[in-house]
Image: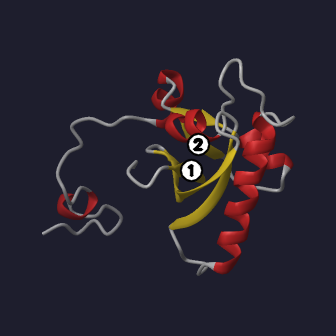
Amino acid sequence: MNNDTTTPPASVAEPFGKVIYAYTRKQALADGVQVDISRLASSLGYKVPVFITATVFDKYVKIPAGVEGEGRDEADFLCDMLWKLHCESRRSPLEAEVYCFRYYFGNPETEKKVSVILFAAWGALDMDDPTRAITIMMPNED
């Protein structure tokens, strides 16, 4: 029997066994899988780091080459997205770990408004850093 009360038994500390492989946020940023938008989010009042997946960025933020963005730039689209997330988070329970929100994207190629559903997940900044962070992603991403 383990009489050391400060160290949990191995079955509690690692309930699924030893981690075989972990993909860190730092690696995801270096690989271009995620984009750090924390600086812009901070200027809008967000108090935690905010990231967006490359899929969301490429589909709903990045303006394609040779296409006019209706006089708007990528920061404008990100501000709209962060505002929609802010509004949804105010309506959701405080303990929610994932927010689902609707974003109306003005597609510069077709000049039509498109409604998309995005998720924003609260979680640790990284495996070794328990600081909270937000990641905006498509419904099929994790």
Q: Judge whether 136 appears above or below 2 on screen.
A: above
Specify which label sits upstream in the sequence, 2 or 1.
Answer: 2
Q: For the residue carrying disc 2, how many other residues have a C-alpha within 10 Å: few (<14), some (14-19), or many (20+)?
A: many
- The amino acid type, in three-letter code, at marker 1 is Ile
Mark 1 and mark 2 in contact (Cβ < 8 Å)? yes
Q: Nearer the viewer, residue 45 or 81?
A: 81
Farthest residue, direction left: 1
- Image location (x, y in percent) of residue 125: 54, 47
Left or right relative to 40: residue 89: left
Farthest residue, direction top: 66
Disc 1 target residue: 136
Q: Residue at x 55, y 41 (%)?
A: 56
- Image location (x, y in percent) of residue 76: 81, 42
Which numbered marker is on residue 52? Answer: 2
* Label 2 secondary element: strand
Q: Judge whether 109 appears above or below 47 on screen.
A: above
Q: Indicate the quadrant where residue 89 lies.
A: bottom right
Q: Residue at x 27, y 59 (%)?
A: 13
- Image location (x, y in percent) of residue 102: 60, 63
Q: Separation of disc 2 and disc 1 at Cα?
A: 5 Å
Q: Residue at x 53, y 66 (%)?
A: 100
Which numbered marker is on residue 20? Answer: none
Q: Nearer the viewer, residue 115 or 97?
A: 115
Left or right relative to 49: residue 41: right
Left or right relative to 11: residue 25: right
Image quarter of the N terminus = bottom left
Q: For the residue carrying disc 1, how many other residues have a C-alpha within 10 Å: few (<14), some (14-19), or many (20+)?
A: many
- Image location (x, y in percent) of residue 36: 64, 36
Instruction: State how many labels appear.
Output: 2
- The amino acid type, in three-letter code, at marker 2 is Ile
